Image (spheres, rainbow, N blue to C red):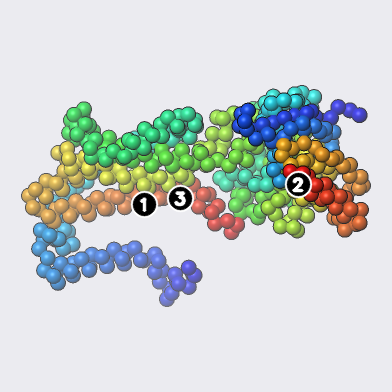
Amino acid sequence: MTQPLVSIDNVDMRYGGAGGVLAVSGLSLNVQRGEFAAVVGPSGCGKSTLMRLVTGLHIPQSGTVEVAGTQVTKPISIVGMAFQNPTMLPWRTTLDNILLPLEIVEKHRGRLRKHKAEYVAKAEKLLETVGLKGFGEKYPWQLSGGMQQRANLCRALIHEPELLMLDEPFGALDAFTREELWQVIRDLHASQDVTIILVTHDLREAVFLADRIFVMSSRPGRVLHEHTITFPRPRDLELMYTPEFSEKVHELRGEIADARQAA
Amino acid sequence: MSANEIRKGGINWVGLAPVIYTIGLFVIWEAAVWAFNIRPVILPAPSAIVEALIKYWPAIQRNSIQTLFTTTLGFGLAVVGGLALGLLVGWSRVIYAGLYPLMIGFNAIPKVAVVPILVIWFGIGTIPAILTAFLIAFFPIVVNVATGLATIEPETEDVLRALGAKKMDIMIKVGIPRSMPYFFGSLKVAITLAFVGSVISETVAANTGLGYMMSAAQSQFNVPLVWAGLIMLAIEGIVMYALMAWLEKRMTGWAHRSQLGNV
């Protein structure tokens, strides 16, 4: 097997100095290039800490975090992030919001002005992929919650990150919109050359989308179980109504319930 | 409010209300003075004030322009100083912590108590009036700009920092645009306060300006002229306030519309 894109080895992360809260302890996991990984667990298990470790927003006190073969010691721009809160900037149009990362990332910020048309075309193509064609000139507050979250995904992908980190991106949406967006993210993963780590509370979401699921313990978080999901791709929403799917979700649910008990 | 209520009988009552209420006030005032036979020294009728306005117009005009000049200049200094200090305070927690008690203490001092010191330094007249307007107006601007900077959503900051954004990037791309509605909102408060400052100073230590004119008129029992000065102040206040409100709407319209949600 080739070298994993993300490799976390025996990491401890404590907030607020020596006497602070130990958020994760002995955390180890690997994610292969091109893989779709999901992380589930009881609330407060350090899933968000995992996000911040991988993106280099936090540096662990012990253990190593490697992304693309190099140890993470500062924020790395090969990652895109999307949170539950879409955090679109209300004074920018949707298109300008999506172009924002390009104004930051070292590789693009110098080229942006000269090659604006090229980048705009790319953003519009992404908008089309997520079903927002023609909405680029609208302001975020003119879009519904689901549409804002789609735009948020475009913003996370515009600089062609190798790794996409999603922190409960669909948590605040209604059930139908969520299912729609599962399909959007499924198709994005299939069409773009990107590795995805999805942090979620929704077990059906995890099983539907992921190749591999990591179940984390309560705080301090570490990986308790690892599941490989072998349902063939492309997966259809109908998959969720098969007994095999339900069985997998049920199994995961049991493991998380145990993890909560253990706390 | 329904469109019906506004358009009853084809007349825009909401639009006309300010005019009608203002005229109403003066009519009731005039009638009350006449009905209760109030002496002009206690409360001159609006007609007597208009008479004074016409009779003393050259002096009123000169003093009104002087007051408008000192107020606007002091306000302008407050805008520049307040914006700069606000950005500085919002930039760094250390600067914020250091300056906060000083600013509170400084703001607690009644500005009329500062005027004598300004007179010792600069003599009576224009400069103390400008500085008093500045001192009183700049505090709300500082507080508002700093608040705008301090309330950036942590997710937005994470997204940008993970892309390698420096503090300056976040400030320019997010912090400053985000604090603009707070800034323009504070201008309405600041311009009103600036008038308080300049008139205080003119009343205590000046040979020109509406404050001086009113205190001089009062010592000669020329009560209609005192009231004429008040009316001029009210007019200047309304005009400047309207200008600031217009500016706010024009510069940061997105902040007003985005609060309406998805229209």
For label 1, the residue is B242
Label 1: state its secondary structure.
helix
Q: Amino acid type of disc 3?
A: Lys
Which numbered disc, 3 or 2, marks the residue closer to the eye?
2
Q: Which quadrant of the figure contains the C terminus of chain B?
A: bottom right
Q: Rate crowding at label 2 as few (under 14), some (14 to 19) or many (20 or more) other CA atoms within 10 Å.
A: some
Q: Is residue A184 visible?
A: no
Q: Looking at the image, which residue is at 60% across and 49% down?
A: A139
Instruction: Check disc 2 and give the amino acid type.
Output: Arg
Of residues B50 and B160, which is closer to you in this image? B160
Label 3 in the same subunit as label 2 = no
Q: Is residue B26 visible?
A: yes
Left or right, A18 with respect to B29, comes to: right
**Are marks 3 and 1 in one subunit?**
yes
For residue B190, side relative to residue B53 (left or right): right
Give me the C-alpha separation between circle 3 and circle 1. Answer: 11 Å
Disc 1: CA contacts within 10 A as few (<14), some (14-19) or many (>=20)? few
Residue assigned mark 3: B249
| Residue B248, image x, y percentages | 44, 47
Tell me if residue B9 comes above or below residue B128 in the rendering: below
Q: Position of residue B40 (x, y in %)?
A: 11, 61
Q: Which x, y percent locates residue B129?
A: 24, 37
- Position above or below: B159 against A232: above
Q: Amino acid at mark 1?
A: Ala
In the displayed structure image, the side of residue B183 where residue A217 appears, left or right: right
Residue at numbered disc 2: A260
Q: Chain of mark 1?
A: B
The reply, left or right, for residue B248 in relation to residue B224 is: right
- Assess whether mark 2 and mark 3 are in contact (beta carbons under 8 angstroms): no
Q: Where is residue A50 shown, x and y percent of the image? A: 72, 36
